Image (cartoon, rainbow, N blue to C red):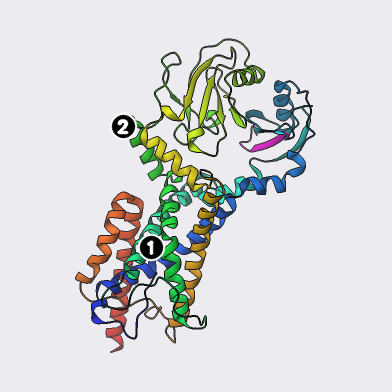
Amino acid sequence: MTAPLKNKAPDVMSGAYRAVWRWHFYAGVLVMPFLMLLTLTGGLYLFKDEIDHAVYRSMIEVPARSRQADPDQWLTAAARAGEGRAANITIPARADQAVRIRVDRPDGAQRTVFVDPHTAAVTGVTAHGGVTETIKKLHSLTLFGGPVGTALNILVEIVAGWAVILCATGLYLWWPRRRSGAVLLPKETDARRRPFWRDLHALTGFYVGGVIVFLAVTGMPWSAVWGDRFMGVMRGTGLGRPPAPAAAGPWSHAKPHDAPAGVGWTLENAVLPVHGHGVASLTRVLETAQTEDLPRPFIVSIPQSPDLAWTVARQTRKAEDARSLYVDGVSGAVKADLRWEQFGAMAKGFEWGIAVHQGMQYGWINRILMLTGCIAVWLLALSGLVMWWKRRPPSLSSRRTGAPPAPPGPRARIAVLCIVIPLSILYPLTGLSLVAALLLDRAVRAFAGSKTVAAS
């Protein structure tokens, strides 16, 4: 987000301006490839329902009938087809759609089995979540799983922090000083010249930068470090999930195979113990959901441990419509009925941010606005690349990369530190990466200086 210069930058820009410009350049080089991947997959995920229906239409659509098969037969059919244990089931909103059952296999793999609710016939089997789940895992960089997936997920947090730094430094560069005014409208129409790309870069950053910052900040709950830290603070201050009902006992932290689905991040991994004796039944749990007037669609999570309640979570688009039932699978008794009003202030802000981030909270206008932010990242990256290409030195080398020159003296870097340090305190992993970048920059400059001395 650079501003147009008339001819040559005056001396007032030679210090702080050049320092901020240099860090804006290097931040873009380091994180833009990752931001482009994140916004590409995020933009696709905004249309997950449409993609899902287009790919699996033959498995999803079933003839609508008035008669319904016994729900426990759905589980039996799915377990047989998926060769494992039924872990959760998504009840659709309409009678002409199949139910989806996640099956956990003994080898650790997961499958999604589509079952006709009227006949209990299997209509198809896919990898868990299908195409949209792959897009989601690419978006969070957890596709590979294990230590590699965790390391890449940590990288997402670093990239998100640097995205905020990019926007902050870009705003600093755009801000008018003792020179021509900041760019508000394009002034150069010739796409072959650098001013056109400079204005396109500045305008895109100025008008859509707020959306990019919002996406970066609200994407932090998915990160491995900052997300867990935020959740810990939220729970510790009592501003998160509601307290467990006295009749149900305290919350427990679920093992991975018992973690309920669809309950939102605030209640992630939270389960309630029960003391029922007998055989649990999906039919009984669905009768309870109907009695409690829980609107469809919703997800029923089936715990592997018999002493845990079944979780029935409404699938919503608006955060304030969230509702989760915790039901004794044997008796059908409701152990907890949690609604939006019972959450703390931090949890409400947390869940609202996620709903807006995913383009669901305010309908199509929300989705289009988030998509605009995703497209803007690509425009910023491509226009930045073109600008660098047009101003690159004749011969590229370790000392001639086309980066803005480093200003002399430490005072010029104060502007950078004033922008970056507060963000680094808020996002510690970004701060650590900043320290690494500072050390690398110093080493490169020292190396280039030694080569200059040797050559002379």
- Nearer-N-terminus badge (2/1): 1
What amino acid is at disc 1? Answer: Leu
Q: Which mark is residue 166?
A: 1
Rendered-image quadrant of the N terminus: bottom left
Q: Is residue 356 visible?
A: yes
Residue 226 versus residue 321: which sits nearer the camera? 321
Residue 444 versus residue 267: which sits nearer the camera? 267
Q: Secondary structure at mark 1?
A: helix
Residue 104 occupies quadrant? top right
**Which residue lies at the image location 28% right of the left edge and 74% below the top edge?**
446
> Looking at the picture, does residue 447 appear above or below residue 114?
below
Q: Secondary structure at mark 2?
A: loop
**Which residue lies at the image location 42% right of the left edge and 66% below the top edge?**
28
The boundaries of the magenta stretch are: 106-114
Image coordinates of residue 311 in percent, x first then y, are 55, 25
Residue identifier under label 2:
237
Image coordinates of residue 52 in percent, x first then y, are 67, 46
Instruction: Determine whether, in the image, residue 332 is placed left or right of residue 455.
Output: right
Image coordinates of residue 383 in percent, x first then y, are 48, 72
> Looking at the picture, does residue 16 appear above or below residue 97?
below
Image coordinates of residue 35 in percent, x first then y, are 48, 59
